[in-house]
Image: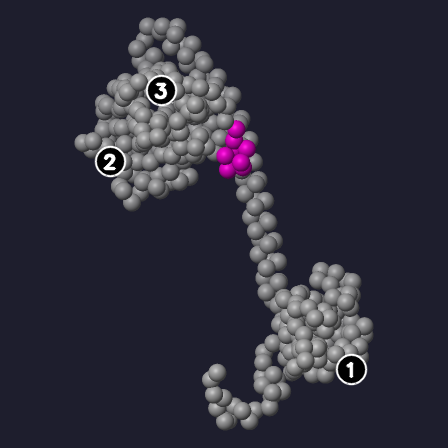
Amino acid sequence: MNEIPPEVSRLDLFTVLDAVANGVSIASPDGRIVYSNAAANRILGAPPTDELPDKWAEHYGVFLPDSDHPFPVEEYPLVRALAGEEVHELEMVIRNPSLPEEVTISSSSRPLLAPDGSTSGAVVVFRDVTKLRQTQRTLERTNAELQESQRLKDELTAFVVHDLKNPLTTIMVLSDFLLEGGSDSEAVRTDVTDIRNAAARIHRMALDLLDLQLAEDGSLKLEVETIATGELLEEVRQTVRRRARRLVVSATGPERSIVADRALLGRVFVNLIDNCIKYGPADGRISIESSVGAGERVCFTVQDEGPGVPEEMREKVFEKYARVERGADLRSSDSRGLGLRFCKVIVEAHGGRIWIEDGQPSAARFCVELPAPAE
């Protein structure tokens, strides 16, 4: 033990306690207050009383938090300590003529033991936590308001996106009808094709927004089935054939099957191909390949011939609304940062993972790895 300097040893114990910022009160074995330091008298707004605990509520004005009910006598920290119990951070409210605005205190107590082990009294230490609780309540209210604001925003987004789907579907159907009608004008066919592609893209964005919202709410449900990888990639090829004319689909090794949501996983690859279209050269080649990885996991890669993604940005591109430029091609300026976020959410919902590598010999290579189907 460190030696106490002479000048400190001469200090009276009560002088030391009166210098403490927290309130300190000591009770005798029969429950009477025998000492309170200056901080205790200030925090409680009243001098110590020689009354027994059943009169403390009247003297100090002790109430249950957030209530007008008096604090139960048997629950007082000093009373519990006299019964041999240690109490930690018990909160009480003090309200009396000296403290009309009330004070919230946090109290801790423990019994004082005589050399023979008997209880010779009890001590309680307490501090004023009024401002702390007021700040906490303000933060809770602010947080609740922010959550409600976010809920209303998400609800509005869901309504708007849902209402967009029907007119977009109509535009797409009518565009297909005009294209199949075989107009003699190549210019008209080109314009209708552009209309159809633009409507399809907005339609996919609307679906991505809805599914992202469902995933964030924890209510996204996968409708899984067993799908052959070749079959899935052929469906993807048919979907993008008009806008990705140089799409090459290949497989390494034997045909494999996966258990997945056909529509959602198909949209993952469509979004990856769309990303390649945005950032690759106008006549660039895009490849999508399936293979079998370690542990029989099924792997897919989608690669373009555009600029690569800087290594330090390869995680950021999967964040919601992230926009990472891959070079100066202005055709990428309409990105809204939803497609790749959708890909990550859906792949992870299938128990897989998605990441970006450097393409060979250059460009970006998107990798998707999915669990092997159960035996």
Could you say which quadrant of the image residue 368 lies in?
Answer: top left
Residue at position x 59%, y 59% from top?
136
Q: Residues within 10 Å of mark 3 (few under 14, many from 20)?
A: some
> Circle 3 sits on which residue?
256
Which secondary structure, mark 2? Answer: strand
x, y percent for residue 206: 47, 28
Amino acid found under the numbered disc labelled 2: Asp
Q: How far across and how far down the image is residue 254, in percent? A: 30, 18
Q: Per the image, is 214 magenta?
A: yes
Residue 167 is left or right of residue 242, and the answer is right
* Residue 227 or residue 242, whichever sits in front: 227
Number of the front mark, 1 or 3: 3
Q: How far across and down, in percent of the image, does residue 246 sit?
A: 25, 19
Q: In this orientation, which residue lies closer to the viewer: 250 or 202?
A: 250
As drawn, the label of residue 176 is none
351 with respect to 86 (left or right): left
User: Alpha-carbon distance for marks 2 and 1?
Assistant: 81 Å
The quarter of the rendered structure image containing the C terminus is: top left
User: Which amino acid lies under the numbered mark 1 shown in the image of this protein?
Assistant: Asp
SS assignment at label 1 = loop
Name the residue tied to disc 1.
50
Q: Residues within 10 Å of mark 2 (few under 14, many from 20)?
A: some
Q: Kindly check if marks 2 and 1 are in contact, taking CB atoms under 8 A apart as contact.
A: no
Q: Mark 2 — residue?
A: 358
**Distance from label 1 to label 3 (Cα)?**
85 Å
Q: Is residue 257 visible?
A: yes
Within 10 Å of disc 1 (Cα), the crowding (few <14, some 14-19, many 20+) is some
